[in-house]
Amino acid sequence: MKRLLSFFTLLYFFVVPGYAQTYIKPNYALKSHETLEITKIELSAQKTLIFLSVENKITGGYFCADKNIVILYPDGTRSKLTTSKGIPVCPNSYKFKTVGEKMNFELTFPPLKPGTQWIDLIEDCSDNCFSFFSVCLNTDLNKRIDEASVLAENEKPAEALMNFIKIADAIDSKNSGIEGLIYINIIKLAKETNNIQKASEWYTKLKLSGIPRNELYIKHLNSQGIIY
């Protein structure tokens, strides 16, 4: 199930002094870099803090972040990076000393628009840019995704499949961005349980859904050999 579980991470929600909300390892639909993770998001009336970690996998590896990093809202508007901490700005770069070394860094943005349920985090550059699509900022929805994820982790794919289908049926228009994650897991779990009819049914639903980044999710499934 590791290939399935790579598309979601567990999220917990709690209150921290000085911040209205804190999300640990929030769920997202797809990302660009295998070892890059959002470890935490802190939201307040003054700013948005996004904490990330990247692990080096090769000898001589290096990493940097372009100054043009944005939060992309569901309506298409953008919020630009104000400051970064712990990471060089390209073309300067951090050179890892060993394989397996991790670098932690922070990105600061203006406060999120009230009521924002999901965002894209995009490094707007020309080469090897990172991105996270449909980062979910809905506490109840993340809790339900976590519960389904635990079932999958515990090798209960049939139960996990039913939970993800229930989530898909309950999602409203405000949360349409996270549907990519839900659809991907339904399709992969259906295939995992040899329910090809259901996998094909939800693959077709995904194609016709018109959800944000729809073509990326289809392309991803196709790259995994899933085509119906």
Image (cartoon, rainbow, N blue to C red):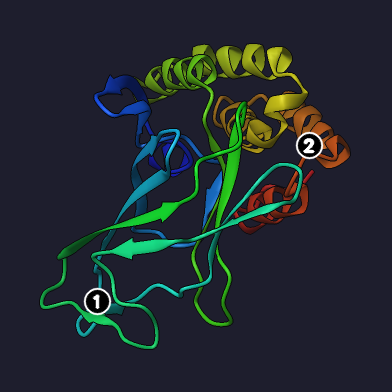
**Secondary element at image label 2:** helix
Q: Nearer the viewer, residue 29 or 76?
A: 76
Q: On screen, 179 above or below 148?
A: below
- Give the position of the N terminus as an image quadrant: top left
| Mark sitting on residue 58 | 1
Tag 1: amino acid: Ile
User: What crowding class fits label 1: few (fewer than 14 Cα within 10 Å), some (14-19), or many (20 or more)?
Assistant: few
SS for tag 1?
loop
Q: Residue at x 34, y 58 (%)?
A: 35
Return the residue nearer the eye: 82 or 91.
Answer: 82
- The one nearer the camera, 99 or 115, is 115
Furthest-right residue in view?
208
Q: Which residue corresponds to the image point at 38% horizontal and 39% vertical from the top-left? A: 41
**Residue 224 position in % (x across, y down):** 59, 53
CA gap between label 2 and label 1 equals 36 Å
Residue 141 occupies which quadrant of the picture? top right
* Marks 2 and 1 in Cβ contact (< 8 Å): no
Q: Which mark is residue 151?
A: none
Q: Where is residue 54? Give x, y as percent.
A: 29, 60
Q: Who's the residue at 35% across and 29% down the image?
A: 22
Q: Based on the displayed image, in which of its 4 quarters is residue 194 positioned?
A: top right
Task: Quadrant for the C terminus, please.
Answer: top right
- Report which residue position mark 2 lands on: 206
Q: Residue at x 56, y 77 (%)?
A: 125
Give, as a three-letter code, the residue at label 2.
Answer: Leu
Mark 2 neighbour class, 10 Å CA radius: few under 14, some 14 to 19, many 20 or more: many
Which tag, 2 or 1, sits closer to the chain's start?
1
